[in-house]
C-alpha cells in the first residue's frame, strides 16, 4: 500500500535545489574562526531556528532545544566548559548557540504525533529517551545547514560536557 504522502510518480517530485544553493550549504561552506563585529539580527536567528526545527526526528519528537547567547555576559557563562582553543573565538562571536536535548520530549508526542500512541514507547524507558534525544540533537548536520542557509557563518565546539546528562 502506498503512503498517502508519497508522490504518485517521479514527475511529482520537486525540482532539486540549485547548484548555487548546494555550494552555499555544503561544497563551499567552511568553518569560520572570526566574525564581523556586528550583532546578528534577531529575525535572522528566528529564521535559522525555524529551518533547524523542521528537521526529521523519530515520531516528530523534536527533542532539540536551542539557546541563543547574544551578550558577552551570557557567553561568559560557557567559559568553564569550552575547549581552550575555542574560548577566544566563542567569546568574540556575535552569537553562540547551545543545542541541547529535552529528556521529557516524549510528553509532547500526543500533540506532535497524534495518530499513534508513541508516548507510551518512551515512558519509563530512559535508555530509549536518551538515545532518541541525543541522536536527534547531536547529529546537528541539519542545524548547520539551516544556519548556513540563513547566511550565518559558524564553527562548532564540542564541549567536554556535551555528552553528559544531569
Image (cartoon, rainbow, N blue to C red):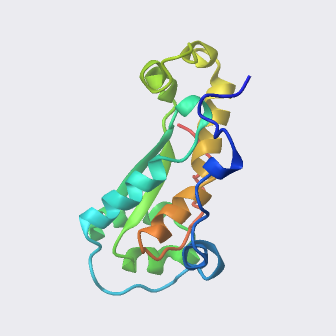
In the displayed structure image, the side of residue 131 where residue 166 appears, left or right: left
Q: Point out the image quarter for the N terminus.
A: top right
The answer to which of 165 and 33 lies nearer the viewer is 33
* 44 vs 84, nearest the viewer: 44
Which x, y percent locates residue 103?
Answer: 52, 31
- Note whether 116 is above or below 163 in the view shown: above
Left or right: 140 as drawn, with respect to 47: right
In this view of the protein, which residue sits in the foreground, 102 or 59?
59
Residue 144, picture quadrant: bottom right
Across and down, in percent, residue 145 comes to 54, 64
Q: Nearer the viewer, residue 3 or 92?
A: 3
Q: Residue sitting at 31 percent across and 62 percent down?
A: 74
Q: Is residue 103 above or below residue 56?
A: above
- Which quarter of the figure has residue 150? bottom left
Query: Who's the residue at 67% across and 35% down the image?
Result: 131
> In the rendered view, would you say 47 is above or below 112?
below
**Residue found at x 55% / y 17%:** 119
Q: Tell me residue 13's x, y (percent).
A: 62, 51
Q: Where is residue 127 in the image (x, y as percent from the top left)?
A: 68, 27
Task: Find the residue positioned furthest to the right.
Answer: 1
Please tell me how many numbered marks the rendered image carries: 0
The residue lying at 64 percent from left, 37 percent from top is 6
Left or right side of 71 for 128: right
Residue 11's place in the image compared with 47, above or below, is above
Amino acid at each position: 500500500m502506498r503512503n498517502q504522502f508519497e508522490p504518485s510518480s517521479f514527475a511529482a517530485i520537486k525540482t532539486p535545489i540549485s547548484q548555487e544553493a548546494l555550494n552555499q550549504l555544503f561544497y563551499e561552506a567552511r568553518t569560520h574562526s572570526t566574525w564581523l563585529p556586528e550583532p546578528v539580527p534577531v529575525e535572522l536567528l528566528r529564521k535559522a531556528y525555524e529551518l533547524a526545527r523542521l528537521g526529521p526526528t523519530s515520531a516528530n519528537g523534536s527533542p532539540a532545544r536551542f539557546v541563543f547567547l547574544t551578550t558577552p555576559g551570557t557567553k561568559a557563562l560557557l567559559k568553564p566548559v569550552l575547549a581552550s582553543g575555542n574560548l577566544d573565538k566563542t567569546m568574540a562571536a556575535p552569537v553562540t548557540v547551545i543545542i541541547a536535548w529535552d529528556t521529557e520530549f516524549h510528553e509532547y508526542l500526543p500533540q506532535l504525533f497524534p495518530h499513534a500512541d508513541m508516548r507510551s514507547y518512551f515512558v519509563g524507558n530512559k535508555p530509549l529517551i536518551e538515545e532518541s534525544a541525543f541522536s536527534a540533537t547531536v547529529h546537528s548536520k541539519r542545524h548547520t545547514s539551516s544556519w548556513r542557509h540563513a547566511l550565518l557563518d559558524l564553527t562548532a565546539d564540542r564541549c567536554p560536557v556535551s555528552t553528559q546528562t544531569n
